[in-house]
Image: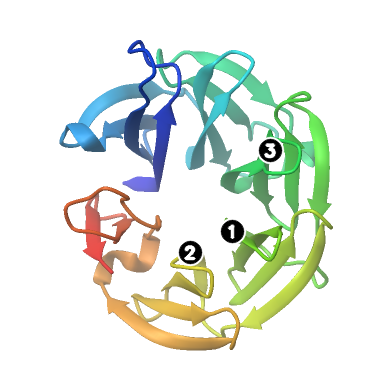
């Protein structure tokens, strides 16, 4: 059963060929067996790397970032514990090239981590890890040290933040998040303040960006995808699909032959690509 799926695109500036950058596109999936698989999109979805994380609990999210100091790409993974003892919950980093364990990121109060994002701060040119826990969002500076806390975002009443994405608008960078109770929150990452709230009135967890104005989210009750207008605060019906009950959405495949696409995965062990 696929727990999470993420899409990544980047240019390799350390290519062996002089003065030439190479495009890489990866799809990263994780399942209940604590296995992370890296799929090479440009090479017909072949398996590039298989990582056995040996977690005690299920993997709930993963992300990828490039460390400028080591000049290596890392996969970040987090777990969700279904037991009352969550002291084993962890956020760990693995090398994309070798699959080897790199280091562990300390999480305050040992909360479960539902979702991970990597934020490249355009002001200080440093990488930050955004962790979505039970009732708060933690942002750690990955450049200054794995335990360096940048911000703790909390909204009253406290909500379970499950998913989100980052986008730029009017000289600032925003974090759009969704909660299980149907609220969408927009945070200013520079001021660390909440700037917008939208009550969708639907049970949803996972949200992705379509463009600056619109987002796409999974509706758990209707088993469909909805389009959210962040400016007008309106909801529009989208794609109907039975496997969206456990869907993990990703924005698009940048160079796909199908054009702008939505990637989903569910408990039916199937990965689907939708043309938007």
In the rendering, which numbered label is found on residue 211?
A: none
Q: Position of residue 28 (x, y in %)?
A: 37, 38
For label 3, the SS is: strand
- How much space separates mark 3 and mark 2, taking CA atoms? 19 Å
Q: Nearer the viewer, mark 1 or mark 3?
A: 1
In the rendered structure, the answer to whether residue 127 lies left or right of residue 96 reads: right
Which image quarter: residue 19? top left
| Relative height, residue 145 to residue 173 (above, below) | above
Compared to 55, does 155 lie above or below? below
Residue 208 seen in the figure: yes
Front residue of this view, candidates 103 and 3: 103
Q: Is residue 34 visible?
A: no
Q: Residue at x 29, y 61 (%)?
A: 260
Measured as percent of width and height from the top left, residue 224 is found at 34, 76
Q: Is residue 276 left or right of residue 204?
A: left
Hey, which quadrant is residue 7 in on the image? Answer: top left
Mark 3: few, some, or many residues within 10 Å (few <14, many ≥20)?
many
Asked if the residue at tag 2 contacts the one at tag 1, i.e. Cβ–Cβ closer than 8 Å, the answer is: yes
Q: Residue at x 23, y 59 (%)?
A: 259
**Which residue in the structure is indicated by mark 3?**
128
Q: Residue at x 18, y 58 (%)?
A: 258
Q: In the rendering, which numbered label is found on residue 209?
A: 2
How many residues crowd around disc 1 within 10 Å: few (fewer than 14), some, or many (20 or more)? few
The residue closer to the viewer here, 88 or 257, is 257
Hey, which quadrant is residue 167 in on the image? bottom right
Image coordinates for residue 239, horizontal then vertical, percent: 29, 77
Of the 4 image quadrants, the one containing the C terminus is: bottom left
User: What SS does tag 1 mark?
Assistant: strand
- From the image, tell me which residue sits under label 1: 167
Q: Name the residue at 81% across, 31% down.
A: 148
């Amino acid at each position: 059963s696929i727990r999470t799926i993420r899409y990544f695109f980047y240019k390799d500036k350390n290519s062996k060929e002089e003065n030439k950058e190479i495009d890489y596109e990866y799809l990263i999936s994780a399942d209940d067996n604590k296995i992370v698989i890296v799929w090479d999109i440009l090479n017909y979805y072949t398996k590039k790397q298989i990582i056995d994380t040996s977690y005690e609990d299920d993997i709930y999210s993963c992300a990828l970032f490039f460390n400028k100091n080591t000049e290596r790409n890392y996969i970040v993974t987090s777990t969700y514990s279904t037991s009352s003892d969550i002291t084993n919950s962890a956020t760990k980093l693995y090398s994309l090239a070798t699959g080897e364990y790199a280091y562990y990121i300390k999480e305050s109060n040992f909360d479960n981590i539902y979702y991970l994002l990597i934020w490249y701060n355009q002001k200080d040119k440093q990488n930050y890890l955004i962790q979505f826990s039970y009732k708060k969002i933690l942002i750690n500076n990955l450049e200054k040290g794995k335990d360096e806390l940048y911000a703790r975002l909390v909204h009253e009443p406290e909500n379970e933040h499950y998913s989100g994405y980052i986008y730029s608008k009017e000289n600032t960078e925003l974090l759009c998040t969704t909660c299980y109770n149907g609220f969408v929150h927009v945070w200013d990452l520079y001021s660390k303040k909440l700037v917008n709230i939208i009550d969708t009135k639907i049970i949803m967890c996972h949200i992705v960006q379509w463009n600056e104005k619109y987002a796409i989210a999974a509706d758990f009750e209707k088993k469909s995808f909805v389009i959210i207008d962040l400016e007008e605060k309106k909801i529009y019906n989208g794609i109907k699909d039975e496997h969206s009950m456990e869907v993990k959405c990703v924005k698009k495949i940048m160079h796909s032959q199908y054009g702008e696409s939505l990637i989903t995965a569910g408990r039916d062990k199937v990965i689907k690509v939708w043309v938007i």
